[in-house]
Amino acid sequence: MIDHLFAQKLMALRQKTKKIQPLIHCITNPISINDCANAILAVGSRPIMVEHPAEAAEITTSAAALCLNLGSITEARLQAMKLSAEAANKNNIPIILDTVGASCSSFRKNLLGEFIPLRKPQIIKGNISEILAVCGMDCHSSGVEANSSQLINKDNAEEYSRLLSSWAKKNSTVLLVSGPMDYVTDGSVSYLIKNGVPMMGNITGTGCMLNALAAAYAPGGLSIEAALLAAVSFGIAGEIAAKHSTGPGTFHMQLFDALYNLTDADIITKGKITEL
């Protein structure tokens, strides 16, 4: 169960998001674009999925947050991301960045090495291998999945937290690390989130959806609160969906219903957040 005062902050962010219905500009990959849009809608924000370089920056200026994803990157989408990020910086619009594939491609790793210091995303999301690559630490990965030997667990959480929180503080950002245990830090405070189910790894795009949810909540409050609320909400929705599904297909369907129908009471009673 979440601490009462802490829960109040997250519930306030949920309600504010539903009230203001912020427009979230997403430039994501075609594999998960539909799921990201529906995840954003499920929690009360509004998605717009524009990626043409000729209009991307203009669309960003009318949005409340910019959600970027490096999955299945193309030259046109990359150009749109750069133009949109520049527009976001000029208009004080938060950038939420998913570092898909950073650990398996030198192109993406080098790209992020230039992009992050220049555009200063408020939230940087990835699995542990991707985040280690972004932070310039030793990582091992084949494909876009995290190396199982590097996953955050109860035995290594404190050591990871020391390294990752230091990097987050130095770069003035929030790190959102997805995995069987999610991890969130802004450099000053760090949390483990222990919600979720293994089935979430059996459908494509759950990491992308988590990034989109963080973007959906980002306009309504602090970046660390947005990242935490995204992680705990999505994890609980996964737990609920698993109880009503028989495999990946029905789980995928039930996941959106669970996310849409999630209540404050669900988060307060089922949330498993531990401060490190």
Image (cartoon, helix red, strand yellow):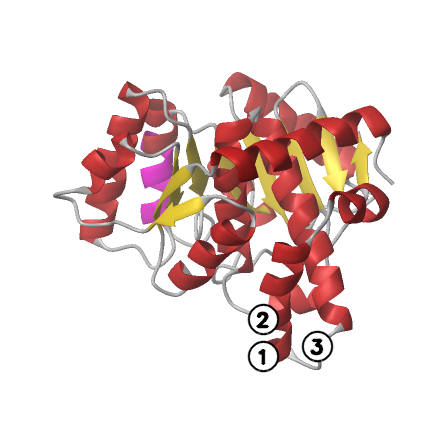
The span shown in magenta is: 107-114
Look at mark 1 in the image and give the residue it sits on.
249
Give the x, y percent position of residue 8: 75, 28
Question: Taken as a whole, is the magenta stretch helix, strand or loop?
Answer: helix
Name the kind of residue labelled 1 in the image.
Gly
Asked if the residue under mark 1 is in contact with the one under mark 3, i.e. CB atoms within 8 Å, the reply is: yes
Report helix, strand or loop for mark 1: helix
- Alpha-carbon span between mark 2 and mark 1: 5 Å
From what the image shows, is residue 49 above or below residue 227? Answer: below
Which sits earlier in the primary sequence, circle 3 or circle 2? 3
Query: CB under 8 Å between callouts 2 and 1?
Result: yes
Q: Is residue 50 left or right of residue 128?
A: left
Q: Image quadrant of residue 68?
A: top left
Mark 1 burial class by Cα count in 10 Å: few <14, some 14-19, many 20+: few
In this rendering, does residue 161 appear at all? Answer: no
Q: Quadrant of residue 258?
A: bottom right
Whether residue 203 sits left or right of residue 77 in the image: it is: right
Q: Is residue 211 magenta?
A: no
* Amino acid type, mark 2: His
Residue at label 3?
245
Contact check, label 3 and label 2, Cβ < 8 Å: no
Residue 265 on image: x %, y %? 80, 45
Looking at the image, residue 270 sits to the left or right of residue 237; the answer is right
Residue 69: percent from left, percent from top? 39, 48
Give left or right: position of 202 versus 171: right
Q: Mark 2 points at which residue?
A: 252
Identify whether 133 is placed above or below 221.
below
Q: Which residue lies furthest to the bottom in this view?
A: 246
Task: Name the secondary structure under disc 2.
Answer: helix
